[in-house]
Amino acid sequence: MPFAKVAVRLALEDDVVVAKSTLKEGTELDFDGIPVVVRGEVGRGHKLAVRALADGAPIRKYGQTIGFARGAIRAGEPVHVHNVDARDFERSAEIGTDVHPLAPPPPDEARTFQGFARPGGKAGTRNYLAVISSVNCSASVSKYVAERFRGPDFARDFPGVDGVVAFTHKSGCAMPDDAPTRLLQRVLAGVARHPNISGWILLGLGCEVNQVERLVREQHLDGGTTPPAVMNIQTQGGVAKTVEAAAAAVRKLLPAASALRRQPLPLSRIALALNCGGSDGASGITANPALGVASDELVRRGAASVLAETPEIYGAEHLLTRRAVNRGVGEKLLALIQWWEDYARLHGASIDNNPSVGNKAGGLTTIFEKSLGAVAKGGRAPLSAVYQYAEPISAPGFAFMDTPGYDPVSMTGLMCGGCNVGVFTTGRGSVYGCKPMPCIKVATNTTLYEWMKDDMDLNAGTILDGTETIEEVGRRIYEEVIAVAGGKKTKSELLGIGDEEFAPWILGPLF
């Protein structure tokens, strides 16, 4: 049987292929005239050796090294955690050697989306009000306030407002009053400034490290025509009084928010968050490269598109530095990799031990393999900037943001940086949702899409099925981004997900 019917080879020099469906032991495959017998069952998304590999030999996939043979591997043998080592190896950190500007869109094209015009040339894709908690001690009160504005009466009276959301977290005190506090303040300020937030109030307890007045002052949140609504529970006189005062402050914001209307805006006002979670062996073959196509289509129209999850580009960072527009951008990315190596060592961990139980069950063996598939989300555009966690995204183009690989923490950073639409690829079945940023979920395989159809927005498994190309699925993702930016509800929005997924990155000791 020709191998192309049942497996995918991503580069001619690859030592492995990826099974499209389960291959039974004893199946005979034809690799360009060379017969190879399958020497053990290979699940969908898992790897099969196409040639013999000596002990210690590098194993190539995507044309890149993903690990090393642990013992001799015969042609036809499954290749996975039982016979692959993931040790570090030399990678050429070239900078700017593979920069190819994207072709502009047709001159007569004028694509738009229906968004909310915001100050400073920003655009909202949703219209929320925010109740922001400075510290976990005010979290419940923040939720009580938001709960006052739910139900059919609210939707009837304020049809232009998507909702009132409480942004709560587990930090804000008993922390160093330096870098960790500044990071949290940057995150919370990112919520207040977000283009999908038309108004906000800030609630504290009163005695916490992360003081509300200082947050407003140091993050320059007091520059509007109306002073921000900031209050502390201790000053107000307790929970009940604070809830009443805060709810009254929210009511004052509602008329202006409700009066806003969508209007045609250029695609250049989209800032796209790129993320993946619950990845499998198909992620780097289907959904991720298709998302890369969509990302490029937006970038060439002046939009921003931001990749993240620094531990999950480890081993593939050299592919991004080659696309850096200048040495400063490339060196900034390499410095992040070095920081993460040091950070992992400090805590007695290893950054190359990233793939989760679900990743491995889906066919991913090493962090290098996972990373090579993950960077495909970034398409081919030049790497124009590298941002710190939750740092404001200040320019169009393809960029990278430093975040952990944990999905809620990563997406929180991207959202607080200003991304107004997210696309999240998954092979195992994430049910992630985000407020105030709508999140489109793309299944990497048809089995998952059919099994979790209520949660998945799009199916990229058609690429493995042979019914669509990467470019065709990429175009579908691109069109879905425009539709969702214009108000189409994602599956997670229809399910009401997103109130509990706000998860700032918490650094430093807890005292």
Image: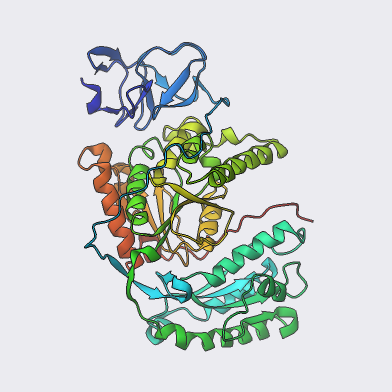
Q: Position of residue 421 (x, y in %)?
A: 41, 61
Q: Nearer the viewer, residue 351 or 293?
A: 293
Position of 353 relative to 288 (above/below): above
Q: Position of residue 453 (x, y in %)?
A: 31, 53
| Residue at the image point whose x is 77% and y is 58% from the top | 176
Q: Is residue 306 left or right of residue 337?
A: left
Q: Nearer the viewer, residue 113 or 302?
A: 302
Position of 302 relative to 293 (above/below): below
| Residue at the image point whose x is 66% and y is 59% from the top | 183
Position of 135 relative to 511 (above/below): below
Task: Give the tally of numbered discs.
Answer: 0
Q: Nearer the viewer, residue 321 or 26?
A: 321
Colour pattern: rainbow
Q: Position of residue 116 (x, y in %)?
A: 39, 75
Q: Is residue 408 left or right of residue 184?
A: left
| Residue at the image point whose x is 71% and y is 85% from the top | 236
